[in-house]
Image (cartoon, rainbow, N blue to C red):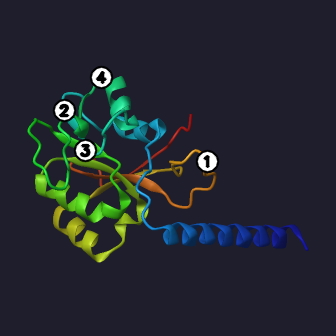
Amino acid sequence: MDDLEKEEKKTLIERSYMKQAMINYIKQGPNDELYTPRYAVLPLIKYIPKDKIIWECTDFGEGEITKTFNEFGYNVVASYKDNLDFLNDKPKFQFDIIVTNPPYSKKNEFLQRAYELGKPFAFLLPLTTLEGRFRGRLFRKYGVEVLILDKRINFLKQKKNIWFNTSWFCWKLLPKQLIFEEVEVR
């Protein structure tokens, strides 16, 4: 077996492993406990104006999105303040931009609600969010911008192989519809 054949065989084995990991994940049902690491937030920071109030609508404690933006001097309101349900409650505070990593099993509902609120937003979602009829209708109607991250985000420390890319899905925030950013894992 020459080097090319060995490399092809290795690639096939890796693809098989990744497909099996995806099948196992799907069989488990929705797992919405994916906590955003700080390094996933950093590429977004430069696109958020400092004078705006950010609503982190899924942070009920000490999330990295809130911590990271606070560290850079942003004014962030987290939902735990008023125990708000983003999908059903109307916020009783001023905000200019929504930034969050929503539960992926509810990405349709979160996107629809964000568009209805009419405020700019940035959601960290699987790149496959571009697929699907419902989301396609939303994106055609309102528009979408995507900040593509060059590395997959590891949300679970014990998990070594990440089989999907997440990127920032934005509306009325980015200077172009498609931007590629580098991620520095620290």
Distance (Cα) linking label 1 and label 4 = 31 Å
Q: Which of marks 3 and 2 is in front?
A: 3
Task: Give the mark nearer the N terminus: 1 vs 3.
Answer: 3
Q: What residue type is labelled 4?
A: Gly
Q: Do the residues labelled 2 and 1 touch (CB within 8 Å)?
A: no
Horizontal arrangement in the rendering, residue 6 relative to residue 14 (left or right): right
Q: Is residue 144 in view from this perspective?
A: yes
Q: Nearer the viewer, mark 4 or mark 3?
A: 3
Mark 3 surroundings: few (<14), some (14-19) or many (≥20) residues within 10 A = many
Task: Give the mark nearer the N terminus: 2 vs 1.
Answer: 2
Is 87 in front, or is 46? Answer: 87
The quarter of the rendered structure image containing the C terminus is top right
Distance (Cα) linking label 1 and label 3 = 26 Å
Q: Name the residue under label 2.
A: 52
Number of the label disc, if any, that sits on residue 57: 3
Q: Which amino acid does label 1 sit on?
A: Gln
The spot of residue 30 in percent (x, y) is 42, 64
Q: Is residue 50 above or below residue 99?
A: above
Q: Mark 1 points at which residue?
A: 158
Task: Give the mark nearer the N terminus: 4 vs 2.
Answer: 2
Q: Name the residue under label 4.
A: 73
Task: Give the mark nearer the N terminus: 4 vs 3.
Answer: 3
Q: What element carries label 2?
A: loop
Q: What residue type is labelled 2?
A: Lys
Report the residue at 23% width, 40% height from top: 79
**Which corner quadrant of the image does residue 8 belong to?**
bottom right
Q: Which amino acid does label 3 sit on?
A: Cys
Report the residue at 28% width, 76% height from top: 133
Q: In this view, does 32 lie above or below 67?
A: below
Distance (Cα) linking label 3 and label 2 = 15 Å
Mark 2 surroundings: few (<14), some (14-19) or many (≥20) residues within 10 A = some
